[in-house]
Image (cartoon, rainbow, N blue to C red):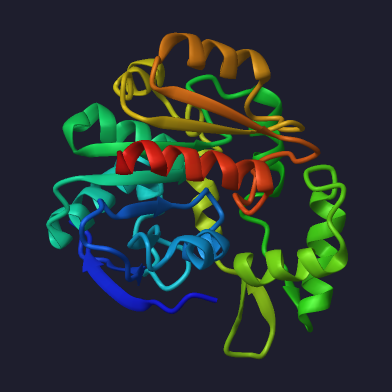
Amino acid sequence: MAEWSDGWWMSGDGLRLHYRDYAGRDDRPPILCIPGLTRNARDFEGVAARLAGEWRLICVDLRGRGESAHARDPMTYVPLTYLQDVEALIAELGLKRFVAFGTSLGGLITMLLALTDRSRIAGALLNDIGPEIETKGLETIRAYLGRSHSFPTWLHAARFLCDAQKERYPDWPIEQWVVFAKRLCRLNANGRIVLDYDMRIAEPFKQPGGDTGFDLWPAFRALDGIPSLIVHGELSDLLTAETVQRMVAENEGLEAVTVPRVGHAPTLDEPEAQAGIDALLARVAG
């Protein structure tokens, strides 16, 4: 596992937020890694293990996840607030230009970062997310989001996740589920293993329009011409092959990779995803 240093920044409403900082070459733009709805900075451990040293990676814990503080008002668990938080980090670190890797919700934030100021985006990876989000996938998320669970061992946590999500990763052995559990969960003060996010993130998401609440196509089009990659899980219920085709048709800088036998969302550790990432970064490095 690659080594990192812990970093902290403050949100506009006074929350202490956390990121992992993996050192890399200073002659390349850093990679800003933004995780999905229920995930955290550990979600990019595999990516960092492969790329750190050659590339600096800044992996964030969004508010209410991982080491970041929980929001006082759960209605701030929305994309525009996450965008403001990430903008505050970019300003804090003085990032003039960077590559953005975004999984699911992180991909939405990546598109919004481009919409706000595309000149700073050296490259972008959208992991199983696009401007069209399938209702079936949203219903699946609403069904499990915000339901707390606790487990006595990592194996129990892994078996729970396997039972709940095996249609997303049908070929995973139990060892891979344990790795997944350790990325998604944490050990609490009582010695129990729990999901590592504030259960209240579900509150705005379950409101009408709470999943996004706005048209994402203009945000996606802000990436036009920027070296970009869409990683699509073949079994995804959130992103369809048809949407991917339209995205590629509308953005000449976008390449697409499909990860077979994987749903929402690929871990980015799959060979197909790794090859796509390497090709993207080669384009960025020029």
Does residue 2 lie above or below 263 as drawn?
A: below
Quarter that holds the N terminus: bottom right
x then y, percent, for residue 262: 75, 41
Identity of the residue drawn at 19% across and 38% down:
120
Identity of the residue drawn at 84% across and 43% down:
167
Quarter that holds the C terminus: top left
Looking at the image, residue 107 sits to the left or right of residue 11; the answer is right
Identity of the residue drawn at 48% across and 21% down:
131
x then y, percent, for residue 282: 40, 41
Looking at the image, residue 42 sits to the left or right of residue 31; the answer is right
Does residue 269 lie above or below 187 as drawn?
A: above
Residue 39 falls in image quadrant: bottom right
Q: Residue furthest front?
A: 286
Does residue 12 lie above or below 121 as drawn?
A: below
User: For this rendering, which residue is in front, 48 or 59?
Assistant: 48
Residue 261 falls in image quadrant: top right
* Residue 278 seen: yes
x then y, percent, for residue 284: 33, 39
Looking at the image, residue 151 sits to the left or right of residue 222; the answer is right
Does residue 188 lie above or below 85 as drawn?
A: below
User: For this rendering, which residue is in front, 245 or 50?
Assistant: 50
Count of all numbered marks drawn on residues in the image: 0
Identity of the residue drawn at 17% across and 53% down:
95
* Residue 198 seen: no
x then y, percent, for residue 12: 18, 56
